[in-house]
Image (tube, coloured by chain):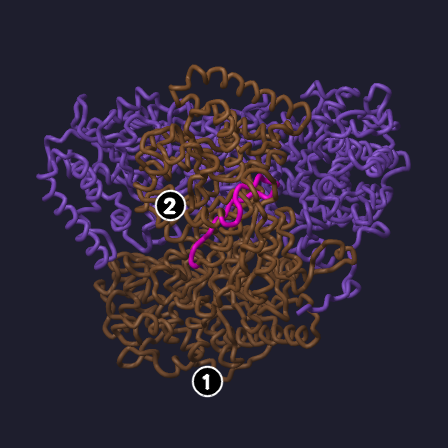
Chain colours: A purple, B brown
């Protein structure tokens, strides 16, 4: 049932072929400027092709032969000329207005369009001297691209001036926004690809304009490049009417300036006029706000650049459209080494950029091209914001010991674990008014970190109602960033850190999976940076996972998912850390450590509810410093080999393991139990696998070589096996954890369903010690009865039996 | 540096308090209709409060006392009255226009607002007879809510009429779109919360209107409820100007109708007029398209309902705003059991709905309320689309054997593994023209599934250019859904499956992490459904993960991530399946099996590039049926106990394991090697953990009890340990896999870096067999040299050494 296709003419045909159209009128460039700008851009495009194709004859000094062509043709032409076009015009604006500007390339696989101008401006050679401005350097530059041991087709960490790789799409605007925070003079030019624009994270991140303060923050200049195509498809935004697109962008809060066309000269004029106008708008908004002291949300400018995909490629090859079509996406002519006609076509195409005019006899770009780039640190490849460690100031951290609580005896009082952390973070915020921010998806109060609002409120620049004064904690100079988009917050934080600042993100445990992929990509970024001597150290990304599974009993199954840790452990040991502090003082100690660290992603798991407290501050510090250890007060092995090891990690699992220990010690006074709590999860891994890993000797001396170990874990139980499978005593390790047995529960019922409760653990021990099998049978029966009683109480009353839920360590 | 807040008066104050405003004018209801509609809504609101608060005195027949109040107050009032308001008006429209309509509640924790009308319409009692329309039934209904053993505060699977839980936010529109596909008469009413609207997935999913064909598909009616607040914050969309919001929604392609206010009578009139108008618009667009046969994209209507959060709650409690403020989000008055004044306040509030007018002496809703609901299957709680198994037709599946390739001898020829699958899917598509769709983010061609376009093109209803005919494969009756948003595609597919259809999604392996969280939530949904006898079986969600890590050597580190499987294994064994077919014929066999299965999420890992072929069709079927097995032709243990087991899972790991086996057999002819390939990953788990798990006996007989096992795995190596740690021979299992050693590589270099290559594996074996230590030393040295040679070749040529990359099984 083929339905008829509506005729194209029924729509306004949005083609880039035809007279150049632009919202901003004017021809700001004289003929000489056009010529030079065009020459720079031609050079960029020549370099992009060189990277994709050449392993010899880099300046086309001789006719192109098959042996000059790389064996494997990789890289993407499609978005490269458009990126280089933008970069070229931003260079002009930087020089004209003396701008402090960095560049982010959102479109996928766009590196050739960025590497070209980086090479021409000389920043590439300064970092990589073997790619200097000579014929040999040029050839090295070409050969390394998409080549083993070389660099990739995204703006990877190896790319000078890049803090946004773009291997995974969708995060360019949130990264740009984070970079602009607290950098009032900075402009972040962020090119958004129209493919990328279809992703969810990008679609909501247009709203960053509601999080930028024109007084205190810099500006983001989004440049939406409608090149019209993805890998094999048109893009949605390129195929809606001009009216719809303009509505959409105005609806997002921008003033969009359109630049549409393909004819170079008029496009250069239009782009120059539009970039100038955008800079003027930005400066006007900032000046007005800064003069008045009133931070309103400007309708920030943005640019829509509708230009052909693969711009300046042949319009057609072998009867197929290339320029202006999706066939320009990757390598437009693939078989040049074997097809003489295609080789000739490529040569003609490359020569169309007139390399002989662009490079001198030594292969150095001619002076007038080099002069089109800004100088020194104004070059976007060397702007220190894009290697943020250069600008990073150490965080001023108050003494975390002062925020702890008194714990006279272990296991006697309850306190909400995250609340004192909020007070600590409040004072971190106070001490670091310009380079620390807190991020959270509308959950900082729910997660009991609301003390921070005394130091810095939630940033809010949209409409304000009188009732917002009633606890709304909103302010246009707020430094707590709250939006119901984990993607946007994570992106902002990454951008903030990579430009040399510090931050902290908290989120619900179950929904941190929303940003699994962003975590993966940031971890990959950091681990490559660790291999680059010129990349300066940046602050760690601190991620507090709270509202955790064991207290999401009431929110139900969808809110119960401790699996993020399983994602974390897949990433490089060099950049990943996981902590499960069980109480207030240990959480403070861990947080202090994480705030001081560099180049990691620190994942801290701690629930927000009332929890039993185990350690005074000194004990907590000692314990966290070790990362794990025996709690002597709960153990009765007294330096001897125990009969059983009761181990635990996480707040509720620790409570239940402790209660199980108390049950067992009362029941079997002769049974020697060693109680171990684990804060630093990677201690369990061999030292060969993770720098925090315990030596086998230390592990054996703690967990014994052959005694049963019952391990009560916060997350999915298999993770402990994964970490500890090489340990001597692994076969005797019996791990309990969350195993997807949830629904609407009480906390205790949820624990029982997943067998992390005290009774299950006590039974686990009895089952593993043949010596107490007989006496244990009665105890087991009693424990099972108690479980049933707990369940019944929960079903009847909707709450947990107070005598069990309110349990205290009897010691 | 406190910057001054701009005065609220400088904005257009967008308050819901004031005269009701609406885009659509008219007062379609007579006084009697208003009275009845309002009564139904009052009843809904009364029920919502009853669910949150009461465990006794459900009809307030006596004064409210502390003992009538639940011990633990849970649930969310905030969005409930608004959801019930919408539901009430949709009921009217269903009756008036005889609509086939289902309902999706996007706002978080909105279940009380949906459960109320479900109870009143009688659909709840039909499924749960103990919650019948009596005082006792009502009390049961109240007590179970947010109560252990009861139901949650989202529209969980236990909710009749729900196929969208909403525990995690962001997916209501994509779910709605999937439900509307191929259901031309269906209207899916989808309420979008303004909190949810801030998420990325939701923000891009407004574009579903570019994927709905007005001839063939049903309609989605989005209803954006601007109640103004999240947990503790205003929402962004509620605090931008009317003009911006209208621009945004028009930019997304809708005709928005606004209904703004709080005064019930005029709001009922405005909502009724607006719903009527929306239905008329939908019908008009459909009629026009269906009459003309031309599928244009209509500017579909949508409704913006700006109404107070917690509507009809007290405006203030204890001096704090409640109705119309974020304080109405959860339980607005918390301490009613202990605070007599608050108890009185609650009682007054509940009595304000006049329950005595709403329920009769037996506690049954009075007739005029019951009559406000549609009848029979028109009730949204019983609409069969929302229990899609009722409507599901078995897929007509051609014989997959006909799509296989000839494999005369194992390991001699190469073929692209996914391409024949594309041909198979093409014919599945042909045979099931109305209930099967393929989904992929602009990657179906890249992933070599493009044969499907011969049966069904890519759906495209936006502007069409002449050049699109050149391989664009676009058509307004296309059935392949491509958008660069994994979130939207996954959501569409879930909606499609849960309404009784079939589908298949393919995506790049690294970026499937983008939908980790959606996978988690769908798995949770399915595993709860399995516990509900009234939920009919639905087709499995089939997810092909391709463009896998071992062939993303050229795209670099960002594109190398096989960690999705680690997320999958955390979910219930009842609903998860993982397959790693190593070649064409096994992939076809697995795909056939998956397409026939029900209630699972099937994850298939298979790369798209040329791969060595191992099995003819009969062998593939036998092998996939077993799930794993010995490849006799590669083994030389000949029924005896081997010296070593070489095991593998995944295409490239299988190739390398096989090449290692060949090396070893040539080097050490006496060495008895058993070669095992694993397709069904869960076979490795004990049968107690997963229904596919091998018995220990079978496992031991395959993997031996004490011989070294070298396991070459597709993903992160620890996953194998996690699955197999309980097996007898686990201590001797040595697993290789991806361990984050990547950048720009060749395939072989990437394998070597991660030690999954043939040389590393051969060395692994030698290291584990003391008997060949002496003779093996030379071989090891030679293998190491060969690794170096391979690396050097890659660094020099950018491609792999042909004699190694082009290896064939010598047997």
The part of the image, by quadrant, that contains residue A412 is top left
In percent of width and height, residue B362 lies at 26, 80
Magenta residues, as a range?
B598-618
Residue A652 visible from this viewpoint: yes
Q: Nearer the viewer, residue B356 or B135?
A: B135
Does the segment drawn in magenta span residue B603?
yes
Mark number displayed over residue B538: none
**Mark 1 secondary-structure assignment:** helix
Which residue position holds label 2?
A547
Vertical side of B242 occupied by B741: above or below: above
Q: In which image quadrant can residue A310 be found?
A: top right
**Do callouts 2 and 1 point to residues on the same chain?**
no
Tell whether A365 sits left or right of B554.
right
Q: Residue at x 40, y 72 (%)?
A: B117
Identify the secondary structure beneath mark 2: loop
Identify the image quadrant of the N terminus of chain B. top right
Q: Is residue B319 left or right of residue B591?
A: left
- Residue corresponding to mark 1: B32
Q: At x 82% / y 41%, what residue is drawn?
A: A312
Res. A459 in view? no
Indicate the position of residue B562 as horizontal and vertical percent values. Answer: 50, 39
Chain of the residue under label 2:
A
Name the side, left or right, on which A688 lies relative to A752: right
């Amino acid at each position: 049932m083929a339905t008829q296709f509506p005729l194209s003419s029924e729509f306004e045909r949005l083609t880039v072929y035809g007279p150049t159209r632009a919202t901003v009128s004017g021809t700001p460039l004289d003929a000489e400027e056009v010529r030079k700008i065009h020459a720079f851009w031609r050079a960029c495009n020549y370099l992009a092709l060189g990277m994709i194709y050449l392993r010899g004859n880099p300046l086309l000094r001789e006719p192109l032969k098959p042996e000059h062509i790389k064996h494997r043709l990789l890289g993407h032409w499609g978005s490269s000329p458009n990126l280089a076009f933008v970069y070229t015009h931003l260079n002009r604006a930087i020089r004209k207005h003396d701008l402090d500007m960095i560049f982010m390339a959102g479109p996928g696989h766009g590196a050739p369009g960025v590497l070209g101008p980086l090479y021409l401006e000389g920043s590439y050679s300064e970092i990589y001297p073997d790619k200097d401005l000579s014929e040999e350097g040029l050839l090295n530059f070409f050969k390394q691209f998409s080549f083993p041991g070389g660099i990739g087709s995204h703006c990877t960490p190896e790319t000078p001036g890049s803090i946004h790789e773009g291997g995974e799409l969708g995060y360019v605007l949130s990264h740009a926004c984070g970079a602009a925070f607290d950098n009032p003079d900075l402009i972040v030019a962020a090119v958004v690809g129209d493919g990328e624009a279809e992703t969810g994270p990008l679609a909501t991140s247009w709203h960053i304009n509601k999080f930028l303060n024109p007084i205190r923050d810099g500006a983001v200049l989004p440049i939406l490049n409608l090149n019209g195509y993805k890998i094999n498809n048109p893009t949605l935004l390129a195929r809606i009417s001009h009216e719809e697109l303009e509505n959409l962008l105005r609806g997002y809060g921008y003033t969009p300036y359109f630049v549409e066309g393909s004819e170079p000269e008029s496009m250069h004029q239009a782009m120059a006029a539009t970039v100038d106008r955008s800079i003027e708008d930005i400066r006007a908004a900032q000046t007005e706000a800064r003069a008045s002291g009133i931070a309103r949300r400007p309708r920030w400018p943005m640019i829509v650049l509708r230009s052909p995909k693969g711009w300046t490629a042949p319009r057609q090859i072998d009867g197929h459209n290339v320029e202006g079509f999706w066939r320009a996406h990757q390598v437009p002519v693939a078989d040049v080494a074997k097809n003489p006609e295609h080789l000739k076509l490529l040569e003609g195409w490359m020569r169309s950029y007139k390399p002989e005019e662009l490079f001198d006899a030594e292969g150095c770009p001619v002076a007038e091209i080099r002069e089109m780039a800004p100088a020194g640190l104004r070059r976007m490849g060397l702007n220190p914001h894009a290697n943020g460690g250069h600008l990073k100031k150490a965080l001023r951290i108050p003494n975390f010991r002062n925020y702890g609580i008194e714990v006279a005896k272990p296991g006697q009082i309850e306190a909400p674990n995250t609340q004192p952390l909020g007070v600590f973070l409040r004072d971190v915020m106070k001490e670091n008014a310009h380079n620390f921010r807190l991020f959270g998806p509308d959950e900082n109060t729910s997660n009991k970190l609301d003390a921070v609002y005394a130091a810095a409120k939630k940033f809010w620049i949209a409409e304000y109602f009188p009732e917002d004064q009633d606890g709304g904690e909103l302010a246009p100079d707020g430094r707590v960033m709250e939006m119901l988009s984990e993607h946007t917050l994570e992106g902002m934080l990454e951008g903030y850190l990579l430009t040399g600042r510090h931050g902290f993100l908290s989120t619900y445990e179950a929904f941190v999976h929303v940003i699994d992929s962003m975590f993966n990509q940031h971890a990959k970024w950091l681990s490559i940076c660790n291999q680059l001597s010129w990349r300066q150290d940046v602050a760690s990304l601190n991620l507090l996972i709270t509202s955790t599974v064991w207290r999401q009993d009431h929110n139900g199954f969808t809110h119960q998912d401790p699996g993020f840790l399983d994602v974390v452990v897949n990433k490089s040991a060099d950049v990943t850390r996981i902590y499960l502090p069980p109480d207030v003082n240990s959480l403070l100690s861990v947080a202090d450590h994480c705030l001081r660290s560099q180049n990691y992603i620190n994942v801290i798991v701690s629930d927000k509810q009332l929890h039993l407290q185990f350690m005074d501050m000194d004990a907590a510090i000692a314990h966290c410093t070790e990362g794990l250890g025996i709690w002597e007060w709960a153990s009765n092995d007294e330096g001897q080999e125990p009969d059983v090891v009761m181990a635990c990690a996480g707040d509720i699992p620790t409570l239940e393991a402790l209660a199980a220990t108390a049950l067992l010690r009362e029941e079997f006074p002769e049974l020697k139990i060693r109680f171990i709590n684990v804060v630093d999860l990677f201690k369990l891994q061999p030292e060969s696998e993770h720098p925090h890993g315990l030596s086998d000797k230390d592990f054996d001396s703690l967990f014994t070589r052959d005694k049963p170990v019952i391990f009560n874990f916060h997350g999915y139980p298999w993770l402990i096996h994964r970490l500890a499978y090489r340990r001597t005593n692994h076969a005797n390790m019996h791990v309990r954890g969350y195993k997807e047995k949830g629904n609407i529960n009480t906390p205790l019922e949820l624990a029982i369903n997943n067998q992390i409760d005290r009774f299950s653990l006590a039974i686990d021990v009895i089952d593993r010690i043949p010596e107490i099998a007989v006496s244990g049978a009665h105890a087991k029966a009693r424990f099972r009865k108690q479980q049933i009683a707990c369940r019944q109480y929960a079903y009847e009353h909707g709450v947990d039996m107070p005598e069990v839920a309110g349990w205290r360590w009897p010691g």
